[in-house]
Image (cartoon, rainbow, N blue to C red):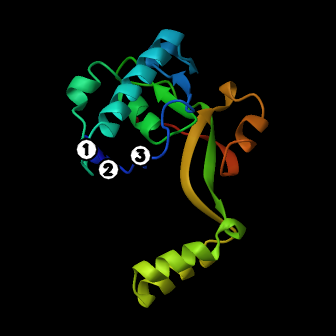
Amino acid sequence: MVKLEYDIVLLDRRHDFVSEYAPVVIDCSSYRGTPVLAENDVCDQYRAAFGNMIKSVNETDEDQVILDLDSECKGLCLTTIFGFFLQYPYVYYTSDSGNCLAGVELILVELGLKLNHVTSDVTNHVTSDVTNLVTSDVTNHVTSAGTNQVFTTFSVPKVLCQTEEQLTSLPYYLRHRTVCLDSVAM
């Protein structure tokens, strides 16, 4: 478990968070007027900072790690750092206090599990760890959710996502839709 500011991120230390992860970094600084791909030096700076944080996490035997974002991320956009920890395939970066995402068509992507991928192993694990009452609540929630169980969503500006295949080929892809928001907070 990693504490970042007031948020907590659970990490599986067996997962390689760095070598196989290369998100697309989108510069949505307000002065740009429209989102663009971030420059290579910005991407490299964030990959290095994220790699250092993961290294700090892996070098400790503690179950809970509190990273000092003041020293680890001095001058960096925390939204980008959180996007890295959440393993989003597209992360936002801004070099100023605002962003240029308001009024921009964004593709909202849902990632999750199709219920036919949920196996009895999940049910057996839940049954062994919690009471029957909680187990039935979990089962009822999953079955009432329809055919998919969403576990996260992210967005990408439509102008930077030229083909649907970029999205449909993502692991755990469920569906996507286009939205346009009057205001976007980061």
In the drawing, what numbered circle is on residue 13?
3
User: Residue 24: x and y, percent?
Assistant: 58, 26
At 29% from the left edge and 24% from the top edge, which residue is drawn?
73
Secondary structure beneath disc 3? Answer: loop
Q: Is residue 61 left or right of residue 168?
A: left
Kind of residue at disc 3: Arg
Residue 62 appears left or right of 13: left
In the rendered structure, the answer to whether residue 9 lies left or right of residue 166 reads left
Position above or below: 2 against 159: below
**In contact (CB < 8 Å): disc 1 and disc 2:** yes
From the top left corner, tell me how far across and down residue 66 is, in percent. Answer: 23, 41
The vertical placement of 175 against 79, above or below, is below
Local secondary structure at mark 2: loop
Q: Is residue 68 above or below residue 146?
A: above
Q: Name the N-terminal-most of marks 3 and 2.
A: 2
SS assignment at label 1: strand
Which residue in the rendered view is the most extreme toward the bottom?
132
Q: Residue at x 40, y 86 (%)?
A: 131
Image quadrant holding the C terminus, namely top left
Which residue in the protein does label 2 denote?
1
Counting residues from the N terminus, which is met first, the one under dot 1 or under dot 2?
2
- For the residue pair 140 and 183, the one nearer the viewer reads as 140
Q: Which residue is under mark 1?
A: 65
